[in-house]
Image: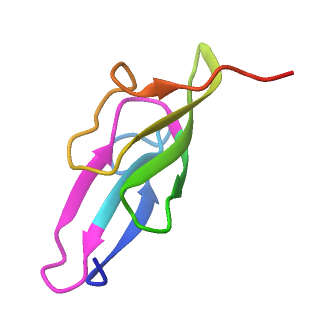
Amino acid sequence: MANRFYVSANKNHPGNREFYHLDIKSKKWTSILTEDGNYEVAVSPDEKYLAYRYSYKNKPWEIYITENKEGNYSCSGDTFLEPYF
């Protein structure tokens, strides 16, 4: 996986922030998290998982964990982490 790096970008709309990986050799962008809204993402050291905060204009921040794979377009199948207080 050393031939790619991760990018947060607003390619679709200025109010959204999506998450992609970019292949260095081919310059191909691969969509990973692209549902409308904003993502703040951390990649696991082995690059198999993503932990992310997701928010939408009428939805507060929530934290999720998912596999790092192409096409994770929605939070619906990801593991939601309940707040611990």
**Image quadrant containing the N terminus:** bottom left
Q: Is 79 covered by the magenta stretch?
A: no
| Residue 14 drawn above or below residue 5 | above
Residue extending farthest left: 26
- Name the spot of residue 73 as percent of width and height, x first: 28, 33
Picture quadrant where residue 46 is located: bottom left
Q: Residue at x 34, y 51 (%)?
A: 11
The colour style of the image is rainbow
- Name the spot of residue 13 as percent of width and height, x first: 39, 40
Q: Residue at x 31, y 83 (%)?
A: 2
Q: Residue at x 26, y 83 (%)?
A: 3
Q: How many marks?
A: 0
Of 75 and 84, the residue lying toward us: 84
Q: Is 37 covered by the magenta stretch?
A: yes
Residue extending farthest top: 58
**Residue 17 as seen in the image, left or right of residue 68:** right
Res. 16 in view: yes
| Residue 26 drawn above or below residue 45 | below
**Residue 82 as seen in the image, left or right of residue 17:** right
**Residue 15 as seen in the image, left or right of residue 28:** right
Q: Residue at x 33, y 22 (%)?
A: 77
User: What residue range appears in magenta?
Assistant: 22-38
Picture quadrant where residue 22 is located: bottom left
| Residue 54 drawn above or below residue 2 | above
| Residue 42 drawn above or below residue 14 | below
- Name the spot of residue 7 as percent of width and height, x first: 42, 64
- Name the spot of residue 84 as percent of width and height, x first: 79, 23
**Image quadrant containing the C terminus:** top right
Res. 10 in view: no
**Residue 83 as seen in the image, left or right of residue 15:** right
